[in-house]
Amino acid sequence: MSKAGIPLSSHESCQRGIETRDHRHHSDHQVQFYVEDASFLDSLSRSIGTALGGGDSAVVIATRTHLDGLTGRLRARGLETQRAVETGRYIPLDSRPTLSKFMLEGWPDAARFAEVVGGVIETAKSAAEGDDPRVFAFQEMGALLWAEGTSGSALQLEQHWNDLGEKHSFFLRCAYAMQTFDREEHDEAFLKICAEHSTVIPAEKYGALIGKRQRLRNITRLQQKAGTLKLSHEELEMRVKERTKELQQENLQILEQAGMVEMANQGLRELSAHLLQVQDEERRRIARDLHDNTAQSLALLSMNLSALKTEATEWYPDLAEGLSENLGIVKQISTELRALSYFLHPPLLDEVGLESALRWYVDGFGQRSSIKINLELHGKLERLSRNLETAIFRVVQECLTNIHLHSESPTATIRLSQFPGKISLEITDEGKGIAPEKLSKLASSGLPGLGLRSMRERIKDFQGDIEIISQETGTQIKVIVPLAAAAS
């Protein structure tokens, strides 16, 4: 067979089923494309049956499924395939093992191919009958390589068959399933495979056309369909471009809306932080007023009642007893008022700092709640900004309140550490923990619960992070605040 083929830009080899290779040698190389296995096997069985019935030999290198289907069809035509196999006129070979005999590193080796396949062709030719022995060969090893995605190997195998045809006389038909060429990127390789064959047989529907007029009519119809598809493709591209432009505009609108939402959220965060600061300032003012004014008035009232009691004890015992009772009430009110003032805003927080304020609060809370609280202060804690010290104190206050009301933990551990560039706070209990579904809801942005919103807003105002880890054995809250953001 000649290696001369048509130019790859031409489609005649795939549309007309005519010769595209030189016929100066005694071999012919056909390719048949098929859609249905049954129609393909019927056609192949007719060709092989004709060859065997005329005394020629046949070599079939096909998949096991196709070999079995072909054998059944040949027997149905009355051919004794076993007798033909025994005499060497019919050589059926499984394509996969045969292919493995001459493949080298994923490519068909020319020397091994000539030795393996050329030997089979010579064996079949020597068994043929008559003065002019002929061999009909069929192979779909190229189809196996193509189906595996190695189109280069499939094309090279077809070229090896052409080279073999230069040395041996035989008629060869190859076969490929049309559905394996279903992508646009297959076009170039498809044309190259067609160009390596002297004759191209289209799929069943077009191969069955009889007569030049019918074929020309069908070609004209295919040309009309191609034109329609081209227009449809152009229209589809235009619609895709228009839709892409619409989506881009919608995306811009979404981005703008997202920016507006983010600005609104930022405004809400700033407002929330401002409200918390106002709240803390108001607590500080009320606590100071209670301590400086109301507490002082109560202290003066207590002194006056004590003096009256002393004078009335000698002359008016009953009055002295009443004054003593009222004096006790005033002292109780004074104690409760002082505690209320400290709860609103402990003066130690402003006067001495966070460390002393936490020690005072933890001792008092432990006595009131009967919870054993372990306060661990790691490293030397330097004074922070007033707002940051207030925020950390409020987080500790809120967490201990939650432990007392919800956790039922007998113990709590508070770890406060100051590192270069950041401050870390961890609060851990050994209570019943938070249910996973409730913890998931608490993790949702903006969802209130257990005072978490106020804690988050306080920490976020300093660009810090807060994390909640809860299991059946207890809950841990971690807070990290960068000192650079806190200082700014």
Image (cartoon, helix red, strand yellow):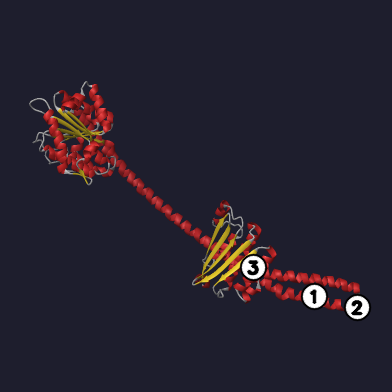
Q: Are marks 3 and 2 in contact (CB under 8 Å)?
A: no
Q: Which residue is mark 2?
A: 314
Which marked residue is nearer to the observer: mark 1 or mark 2?
2
Q: Secondary structure at mark 3?
A: helix
Q: Is residue 330 left or right of residue 386?
A: right
Answer with left or right where residue 333 lies relative to residue 443.
right
Residue 407 coordinates in the image, percent (x, y): 63, 57
| Residue 379 at least partly seen | yes
Element type where label 2 sits in the image: helix
Residue type at mark 2: give it.
Answer: Glu
Residue 227 appears in the figure: no
Q: Quadrant of residue 325?
A: bottom right
Question: Which of the image's four quarters has the N terminus?
Answer: top left
List the residue tagged with mark 1: 302
Residue type of the residue flagged with mark 1 = Ser
Mark closest to the chain's N terminus, 1 or 2: 1
Report the front residue among 191 and 469: 469
> What residue appears at the point 19 percent right and 27 percent down from the top-left corner?
85
